[in-house]
Image: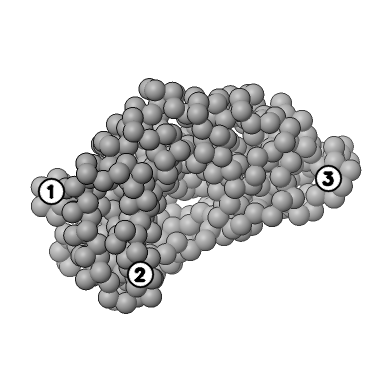
Amino acid sequence: RALEVAAPMARRLAAAGASSGEAFRQLEQIGDQLAASLSSLPTSSLVPMLHACAVAGLPHATLFAAAAQDLSGHLGPLPIVEAFEASAALRLSIPELQALFNTFMDEGLERRLPGTSLARLVAAAARLGFMKGEHTQRLLDRFLTIASPMRAPSVETLTTLCHGLYLSSWSPGGHELWQIALWLSVLDQTHKTHPQSIALRNFALSVLSCPQSQEIVDGFQPHLQLSIAKILRGGQSAPRIPMSDTTLKFRHEVSEVLRRAGCPYDLDFNLGPGLSVELTLPGPIGTLWLLDGPEAFHHPFFSRAAQERSSSSSGPSQSRLVPGEHRRAELLQLAMDTARVDGLEQALGRWEHVGDRASSSSCGDIGSASHDKAGMAAGPLLRLFGSASCRTEMPARLARLDWLSWSRLQPAQRLGVLIDPRPACIVVPPK
């Protein structure tokens, strides 16, 4: 009860920028006591405790590990989903939670969940990095089995599902993708929040960038193609994610090194709606830099000693990036490939122009196109990743550096690493 009461206050102190170190130390002590005496507490109190940790922003790995072992077989599937959501909110990915998820799937507990909870499970497990291909497909199949094929789920449920599929790198099949596209078209005019719009756009972009799913959508009815095109042409920028003081300090130090050396750079370089990098050194031999603070990694972090033993002074840390960061790097590499982007624009042009000719209403909000005498579109006016000339001048390298690796660099090394990234920092395209 003390943890539940104190958690909101700790979160408010952190949000206000007030000193919250003592408050978090006290919460950690409470968590230690709870973890040590968990067997004597009622099972029904486990999930509220984990939720309180999520509210406070306290990734107490020992408490979550102990709770994960007690949750298995003692509670129904819905509280376990809530436990995964609390873990995902904290980016706390530990072996005990992975084992709980595996047990959950082995026992077929997903068959006892309603559709909304299934979507929440897909998203939470994907954010934690627990999902394998067979898990994703099995949960999606179950969702499609119990959902109405004609009556779309709520915007929140469908967005949550699509976000989980995107994070888990789902490989779509024809029927499943057609059903999701149908629901998206039904909800076309429904109001969506900024994060929901970005989540749907990332999902649609993953569909467009996959040759298999692109071919599938080519065979859809025109209005379904058009609904996907409208999502992709959405012009909203990504919401600004709150950053820790550690991240702000790290990025300030990087920019100060470049400023003092007189090197040109751009901050928060935007490559398209919902897609940006923290730092850009412009020019064909420049670099797009992803500067990772603690928010980019799963808890628990590796210890400083383990970090220093793990690699060279300029290499990346051995902590695990969250799936969203892996997917962001993939989309950035896609945006840097002019040939691939041109192919995606052509495919997207087919979808929106076929849909435009089949639609009796104006579709100007997705970017109107001029037509030649044969009635074929000359090309969309809006582009996914900016103009072709802008991409021609884009740096050819994508690299990432985290705050721990930066702190291990000697001051004399830092400028050199930024200008000429070492191989350990270069992001290699997935095979």
Asked if residue 415 lies left or right of residue 197, the reply is left
Q: Amino acid at mark 1?
A: Ala
> Marks 1 and 2, Cα distance to the nearest angstrom?
33 Å
Residue sitting nearer the eye, 51 or 139: 51
Foreground pick, 97 / 38: 38
Q: Residues within 10 Å of mark 3 (few under 14, many from 20)?
A: few
The reply, left or right, for residue 62 in relation to residue 185 is: left
Q: Amino acid at mark 3?
A: His
Which label's residue is closer to the chain start, 1 or 2?
Answer: 2
Mark sitting on residue 371:
3
**Which of label 2 and label 3 is nearer to you?**
2
Residue at 77% over, 30% down: 221
Label 3 with label 1: CB-CB less than 8 Å: no
Q: Secondary structure at mark 1?
A: helix
40 or 38, which is in the foreground? 40
Q: Secondary structure at mark 3?
A: strand
Q: Which residue is mark 2?
A: 9
Question: Mark 1 highlights which residue?
Answer: 306
- Residue 99 sits above or below residue 43 on the image: above
Q: Residues within 10 Å of mark 1 (few under 14, many from 20)?
A: few
The reply to whether callout 1 and callout 2 are in contact (CB within 8 Å) is: no
Q: Nearer the viewer, mark 3 or mark 1?
A: 1
Tell me which numbered mark, 3 or 1, is placed earlier along the sequence. 1
The answer to whether any part of residue 329 appears in the image is no
Residue 70 location, x and y as percent?
Answer: 28, 37
Image vertical order of residue 221 relative to residue 382, above or below: above
Q: Residue at x 80, y 49 (%)?
A: 363
Q: Is residue 269 above or below residue 351?
A: below
Report x, y in % for residue 172.
Answer: 56, 28
